[in-house]
Image (tube, rainbow, N blue to C red):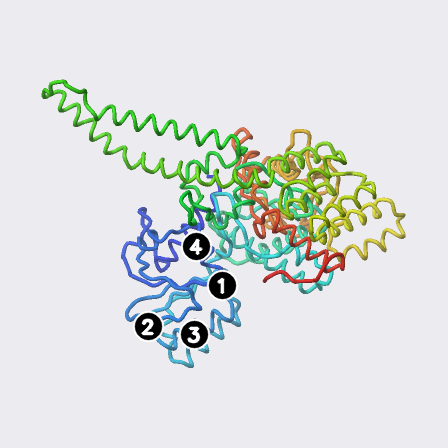
Amino acid sequence: MALNLRQKQTECIIRLLNLNQPVNPAGTANEEVYKILIYDRFCQNILSPLIHVKDLRKHGVTLYFLIDKDRKPVADVPAVYFVLPTQSNLHRIAADAARSLYDSFHLNFSSSIPRPLLEDLASSTLNSDSIHRISKVYDQYLEFVTLEDGLFSLANESCYYQLNDPSAGDREIEEIIEKIVSGLFCVLATLAVVPIIRCPRGGPAEMVASLLDQRLRDHLLAKNNLFSEGGSFSSSFQRPVLCLFDRNFELSVAIQHDFRYRPLVHDVLGLRLNRLSVQGEKGGMKSYELDRLDPFWVANGLLEFPEVAVEIETQLNKYKKDVDEVNRRTGGSSGAEVDGTDLIGNTKHLMNAVNSLPELTERKQVIDKHTNIATVLLGEIKERSLDSYAKKENDMMIRGGIDRGELLGVLKGKGTKMDKLRFAIMYLISTESLPQSEVDMVETALRESEVDTSAFQYVKKIKALNVSLASANSASRSNIVDWAEKLYGQSISAVTAGVKNLLSSDHQLALSRTVEALMEGKPNPEIESYLVFDPRAPKSSSGSSSSHLKGPFKEAIVFMVGGGNYVEYGSLQELAHRQQPVKHIIYGTTEILTGGEFVEQLALLGQKMGLGGTVAAPAP
């Protein structure tokens, strides 16, 4: 059976809402209990893409509140809490119990609650004589946000900035890595799989792989562990491969403009938690949900924008034709005498028409929704020349450079300040050898457009360092590396690994190419140096090279440390469907970022290194 993360997490949440009682095939508990749901902001974001208000009603949830809001007592009703295991949340739960707000408390923590916090809760409720109200305490291992069947985010904000911050100490880096490992452990526990872990040497990816391997090993020692139902004798063919990468592995994808529907909607209109708001036809804002229940979004998310516009028109014409057909069948023939058989036939058509109305209405709503979204997108594309940005950036990556006149034309033409900055950084990354005069010209053009060049300067510095590293002799190289490691691991060698690592001849992303090779499990020079961690194998084999590994893998979980995007997700989905038989790939990341949001983190790093304006730490 294919790994379906959305389905698995939804099942866990439904069980949680039903007081962790067994759920019948209809998806509800055998005994209906009315209850109150209390959550914090993070867990609200977990619930939001998976459970709608009508679903809450179905599971007996009559009221739902944020934990930090003032709430009135509700007698004789159990409360289901779904929150992060933090000190502030536990203090609030203890205070709620002391005030006897609810009849009983069913506590569900998004990940494993630390022992000291659990003991604090026990002593607080004992002191207030309210411990009898705490009915059950569960570790749910659900601390991640699932957006689609095969797409998740740990919602760890500003992760790239924190990992590459030159002033970050070892302890701070370790805390970030531990947080990522905790999130990934939750994902694996929800799927009930112990994967074989692969990653490149060095950098955050190896740190995450090593710590996750240790965490899984420690957990598997327990007799009743979270993975026991997965069976302990699974062969490598039935187990998925977990491929870990650092954002610097392929920096360009996080910055470039893309012209496909799903990435465009995310980048331009700010899709968040599968929702977005756009200007309606008659003024005012309209909110839309774009998820698996929207057949148009599922079917056309990977198409280029012009193809989507054609598809909307096709669907509209088909809808009109179907409506005309219903009208024709139910209208009867004018002037004809109505005998018994005609009446029976007409009644049948009327019944069919009535039955088809809900489906036709739903289709029209979907068409109207995407017509409105596409209209707003088209306005942005024209105003900012986004089609030109996407095409020229793609050409730069393939050709390894751009004509000087063309470069200046873009920087002095249409587009926001961020569009121009992203284009300038793409020029830096894609061009192998940069004439200093050309770089100065780009900087001047950016300043003329009043663009903050901190992010540009940061990538330029890293690229220069990369060149120094390649040309330095071994003695001076070690000095550069000492300094460079403060910028964190792979930043040096990977930011500008050249066009070869950015796009292959068939325009396939380096990430997809590497994942394909890792799933095949055959000897391949591109992945020869990749490490293997198998938490079920003897400890001595951990972190070894891939010589003993057998393939191919039918399923993969691909995780990007430092921020991911819909471009990579789409590329991996295409890869999975291209395979025969079809393979299954889940894509996850520390946070899903637009190109602009990622460049903001680069700008902060540039400012930290004194390469730009004022230093401002990102919002926590």
Report whether residue 534 is seen.
yes
User: What SS does tag 2 mark?
Assistant: loop
Task: Identify the mark nearer the N-term, 2 or 1.
Answer: 2
User: Gap in Å between the C-alphas at discs 4 and 2?
Assistant: 24 Å
Q: Amino acid at mark 4?
A: Leu
Task: Please tell me whether residue 260 is drawn above or below residue 205 in the rendered image.
Answer: above
Q: Which residue is mark 1?
A: 84
Mark identifier at residue 47: 4
Say if mark 4 contacts mark 2, CB within 8 Å: no
Give SS at disc 4. helix
Residue 73, which numbered label?
Answer: 2
> What residue lies at 69% left-to-right and 45% top-to-bottom?
249
Mark 4 and mark 1: Cα distance apart in space:
13 Å
> Cα distance, mark 3 to mark 2?
14 Å
The residue under the point 62% across, 53% down is 213
Q: Estimate the spatial distance between the alpha carbons at disc 4 and disc 3, rounded to whole Å.
A: 24 Å
Residue that numbered label 3 is attached to: 94
Whether label 3 touches label 2, CB < 8 Å: no
